[in-house]
């Protein structure tokens, strides 16, 4: 599993492994997304504004399966 610290207002860090993206928000909420293609993760990491990319391309994309984790 790959952990990446994200310099973002809302996202604390992300974990990635085999098309599963776990987003940990600064509020403590955790969401798992099943991505359809690996390029989505690369585009997220390379984007200028990761908060905006997360909201517009990952969170709003109905093709991705989203699961909220309660820890």
Image (cartoon, grey):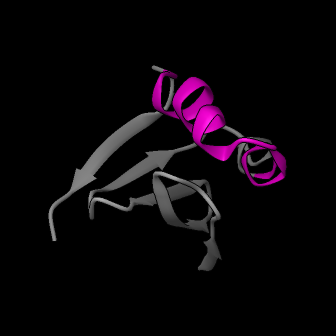
Predominant SS along the magenta part: helix
Residue plotted at (58% across, 41% down): 51
In which image quadrant can residue 43 be found?
top right
Direction from residue 8 to residue 34 in the image, left or right: left
Please provide the residue range marked out in magenta: 42-61
Residue 34, position as x, y percentages in the image:
49, 45
Quadrant containing the N terminus in the rendered view: bottom right
Q: Picture coordinates of residue 2 (x, y %)?
A: 64, 77
Furthest toward the left, the residue is: 70
Q: Position of residue 59 (x, y in %)?
A: 47, 32
* Residue 26 within the segment the image draws in magenta: no
Q: In which quarter of the image is the C terminus?
A: bottom left
Q: Residue shown at 62%/62% (left/top)?
A: 18
Indicate whether 65 appears above or below 41: above
Q: In which quarter of the image is residue 36?
A: top right
Residue drawn at the location 49% of the way across and 57% of the way down? 11
Residue 62 position, x and y percent, is 45, 20
In the rendered structure, the answer to whether residue 18 lies left or right of residue 64 reads right
Q: Looking at the image, which residue is at 65% across and 34% down?
A: 53
- Residue 2 vs 10, above or below: the answer is below
How many marks do you count on the picture?
Answer: 0
Q: In this view, does 59 lie above or below 34?
A: above
Q: Which of 50 and 23 is in front in this view?
A: 50
- Residue 43 is covered by the magenta coloring: yes
Residue situated furthest front in the rendering: 9
């Amino acid at each position: 599993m790959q952990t990446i610290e994200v310099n973002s207002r809302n996202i604390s860090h992300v974990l990635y492994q085999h098309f599963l993206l776990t987003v940990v928000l600064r509020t403590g909420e955790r969401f798992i997304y099943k991505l359809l293609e690996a390029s989505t993760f690369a585009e997220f990491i390379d984007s200028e504004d990761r908060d905006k990319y997360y909201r517009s391309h990952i969170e709003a994309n109905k093709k991705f399966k989203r699961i909220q984790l309660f820890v």
